[in-house]
Each structure stands twice: as C-alpha cells, then as structure tokens.
Amino acid sequence: MKQFGWILAVLAALGVLLAVPIMARRTPGPDCTNRVVIMRGPHGAPVECVCIGGTLSTCFAPGP
C-alpha cells in the first residue's frame, strides 16, 4: 500500500510538471466588449469571433 501511494505521488507530480508548459503557452482571449471581434488566427490570418455575454463563442474566416 505504501508503494502504491508513492507511485500515485510521482504520477501526480509528473502530471503537474507536464501541465505547466501547456498552461503557460495559452494566449489571452480577445476583449469581448463588442459582439463581433476581429483578431489574428493561429496562422496569422484574420478571423471574426462572436462574443455572447462577454465570452468568446465561436470564430470563423471573415467574408460573406
């Protein structure tokens, strides 16, 4: 039982160490003060994003 506890502790520590770089890479979302926000997408192209209730809802390529 003691060995099982150590294994769980090591796995939890590895999980935290792997999660830190992933969380650090996140970029802040757009300022959703307006209903439609235009920003740069992951590949540098502009995208239009729709905000509902101050929260980013969806993004899509601009155009008709």
Image: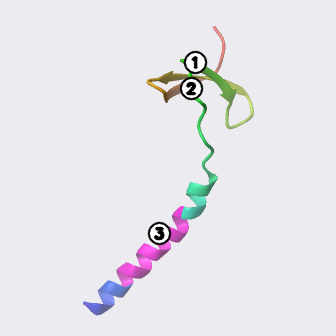
Q: Secondary structure at mark 1?
A: strand
Q: Position of residue 19 (x, y in %)?
A: 52, 62
Image point (66%, 12%), residue name: 63
Query: Which image quadrant: the C terminus?
Result: top right
Label 3 to label 1, Cα distance in Å? 37 Å
Q: Position of residue 7 (x, y in %)?
A: 37, 83
Label 2 to label 1, Cα distance in Å? 9 Å
The disc labelled 2 sits on which kind of residue?
Answer: Cys
* 56 w.r.t. 25: above or below: above
* 1 w.r.t. 25: above or below: below
* Mark positioned earlier in the residue sequence (3 or 1): 3
Of badges 2 and 1, nearer the viewer stands 1
Label 2 to label 3, Cα distance in Å? 31 Å
Image point (37%, 87%), residue name: 6
Q: Are marks 2 and 3 in contact (CB under 8 Å)?
A: no
Residue most toward the right?
A: 44
Mark number, residue 36: 1
Q: Are marks 3 and 1 in contact (CB under 8 Å)?
A: no
Residue most toward the top?
A: 64
Residue 47 lies left or right of residue 35; in this view the side is right
Q: Which residue is mark 3?
A: 15
Of badges 3 and 1, nearer the viewer stands 1
Image point (73%, 28%), residue name: 45
Main secondary structure along the magenta-highlighted residues: helix
Q: Is 6 in front, or is 52?
A: 52
* Mark positioned earlier in the residue sequence (2 or 3): 3
* 48 w.r.t. 6: above or below: above
Q: Which residues are magenta?
A: 7-19
Mark number, residue 59: 2
Q: Secondary structure at mark 2?
A: strand
